[in-house]
Image: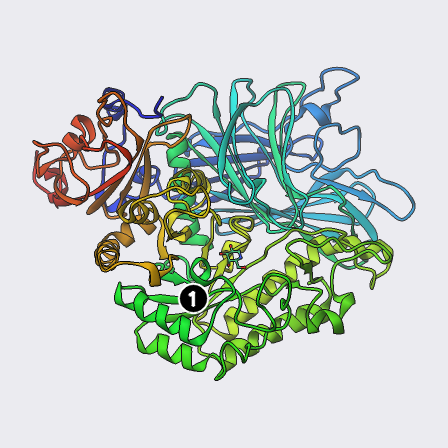
Amino acid sequence: MTALRSCTGLLAAACCAAVFLPEFAFSSQTQQKQPAAAPVQYDSATRVFRLDAANVTYALGINEDNQLQSLYWGARLSPRDQFPAAHSDPGLSSFDPSIDTTPLEFVAWGGGLYVEPDLKITFPDGNRDLVLKYLSHRIEGDQLFITMKDISRAVYVELQYKIDPETGILRRAAKIENRTDAPFTIEQSFAATWNLPRGTNYRLRYLTGRWAGEWNVQEQPVNPGETVLQSRRGTTGAQNNPWFAIDHQGASDPDHGSVWFGALGWSGSWEIAIEQDQVQHVRVSGGFNSFDFGYLLKAGQSLQTPYFYAGYTDQGIGEASRLLHRFEIDSILPHAPDPPLRPVLYDSWEATEFNVTEAGQIALAEKAASIGVERFVVDDGWFGERDSDHAGLGDWWVNQKKFPGGLKPLIDKVHSLGMSFGLWVEPEMVNPDSKLYREHPDWVLYFPGRPRTEGRNQLVLNLARPDVRAWVFNTLDQLLSNNRIDFLKWDYNRNWSEPGWPQVPPDEEKNVYVDFIRNYYSILAELRQRHPNIEIESCSGGGSRVDLGVMRYTDEVWPSDNTDAYDRLTIQNGFTYAYTPGVMMAWVTGSPTWVNHRTLSLQYRFLSAMQGALGVGANLNEWSPDDFATARQMIAQYKTIRRTVQRGLLYRLIQPIHGSEQSATEYVARDGHQVVVFAFLHSSSELYPYPRLCLRGLDPDAMYRLKPMDGTLVAGTPTEASGAWWMHHGVDVALSGDFQAAAFILERVSSSPAHEGVSP
Ligand code: DGJ
């Protein structure tokens, strides 16, 4: 079975599509020009706040109980539409009081709350009741700040809203302030609750995985009860990723229908709870994971929650992904809104593992440069006594046996070959067999008197400790100051265990869940500030640390250690539900692959990796002259489509899910001038031809010229045709056999007459 939509279906759907305007080509949502109005407005008569941007309207009101009540989250409404004042629900029965049946923006545990609270506090006197009421607000451009306060105690909560003008994606967070005269413990602290229109026919999509098997898209109905997506691992984790999308059950057109979607910006233990409650409200709340949480907030201090981003589209799950991609590039990544394109990278890991030497790396670097690689990265093994994963982490000095003259000769050589130089680090970890651990055994996370569980023979340094934070920063700062390093691959190869912090009083120990991550972010931020040209990759044994939090400080991410080019199709498919291909590193590695011992042609491996940020990780010493020629040609080709792949609009034409033998992706450049299509076949059988590919997102009236890239199209395919032709007639790709791939480019040769200013 394939997940392909028929051309007829597309044709029918295309009738309702918005008119294509090249200058707004990125997102159909942004094609609709909305009347200019302040993005955030407050109606003092009704006490309603309204946020409008792109194709989204979001509204909330202060009800008669001074609670903040959700009123609307959906398609953009007319400025003439007036929201009536918010009125709390009377409650269903003595079992379900008003506070549970009224959809609230942010609710604390108190006053008979049974649904998921956003905030739960234990006060020193044992009191745990907290009831928040509206106090004041202020509007600053596209931002809204609302302050709430407990009915008797000096606990203040500032709710923060920001709406993105281009995508309508909202960023929400809360700041909890202790203005009492004593510390209290925060036991649950979410950024926000998102309320969907009341209903029962919702479907939830989310991402699951594990090492070497990340990014599986799951779908399930939103049933009564609660589904919790989470990480209790101290870090983001691959088991769930902090992303969700909810649409209506049965919706099968990826480009039509309402979708509410969101992602948390937090790289520590996190939680997103999706709840259909007893009155069929669907609410999504999330923030710090409440498992083992207990943040001691002293008098005068405040706790800022992670950001929770969420958006809405009426143009299907495909558009939900495209909006997120655009938002990440334009608003999240370092150097946004114009982050640099990813260079073609070579990484030594799969070629040499720990056996890195100056001569060996120079030999690889020369070969990498000869095929057009732009960045050469020395992976694990260059430091300390690091000959295997049993020793050396923490000892970040250059191994003199492997690099007798330090890193300089290699770095100079790499630069002289015209490439930038990258280096692997794993700064938050230590092997017990290291000088660092022998000197500072108390620097790790541990509970005194208990075993210290190792993962890959390593322990986690407690980055929450100010001295450890300072040591990590100084170590990296010196490394970057003393060497002309352009790029760090920042790895993280295990999750937490025994998360103790015995150096602080017992009631502060659990602050580690927040302070560790804050220090991690602050190190990244400070390094970037001191070394403005550095680029950083977030890697965690594959895709275990990918989220909108770390993406604010890193330029790219490593989605999986699984580099099998066929497995990557599924991995990349799931990844791009939430994250842009523009940060998705994808290497061409050896064949047969270490993962499945599967043999794949070099051309197939390149086309698989060219759907993201291309890299090469194969052992170039084993390549034949033909391999070099193929690689040279593919890399040169990639450079001509790189901007379209990394910045364009992604359409999933056929998904490699539900046992599909085929998969195909299409990338449309932001300005619409170039379209790139990749098609893959697992196995053909019984002479069945490859399904026809009907493209999407083109200008139906513009003409596009076909440029074959790799593989063949069936005879008779026109070399030039209209967008309507490519979208509705479609393209037949000549693929048969096992593990075959093809790719082609369309270049727009003329705009539609209307866009040239000529009457049709
Ligand atoms: C895990 C990473 O994902 C790999 O690419 C490689 O860097 C190894 N760690 C090195 O130990």
Q: Is residue 621 above or below residue 494?
A: below
Please state the horizontal and vertical placement of residue 442, each as a whole percent of the image: 78, 66
- In front of the other: 641 or 549: 641
- Check the image and name the residue furthest to the bottom: 405
Asked if 547 appears above or below 518 in the picture, the reply is above
Q: Is residue 750 left or right of residue 108?
A: left
Above or below: residue 464 compared with residue 25:
below
Please tell me in which quadrant of the rendered image residue 737 appears: top left
The answer to whether any part of residue 131 appears in the image is yes
Residue 605 % position (x, y):
32, 47
Q: Is residue 340 visible?
A: no
At 23% across and 33% down in the image, what residue appears?
695
Q: How many marks?
A: 1
- Dot 1 corresponds to which residue? 377
Q: Residues within 10 Å of mark 1 (few under 14, many from 20)?
A: many
> Is 278 placed left or right of 53 in the picture?
right
Left-right relation of 63 to 197: right
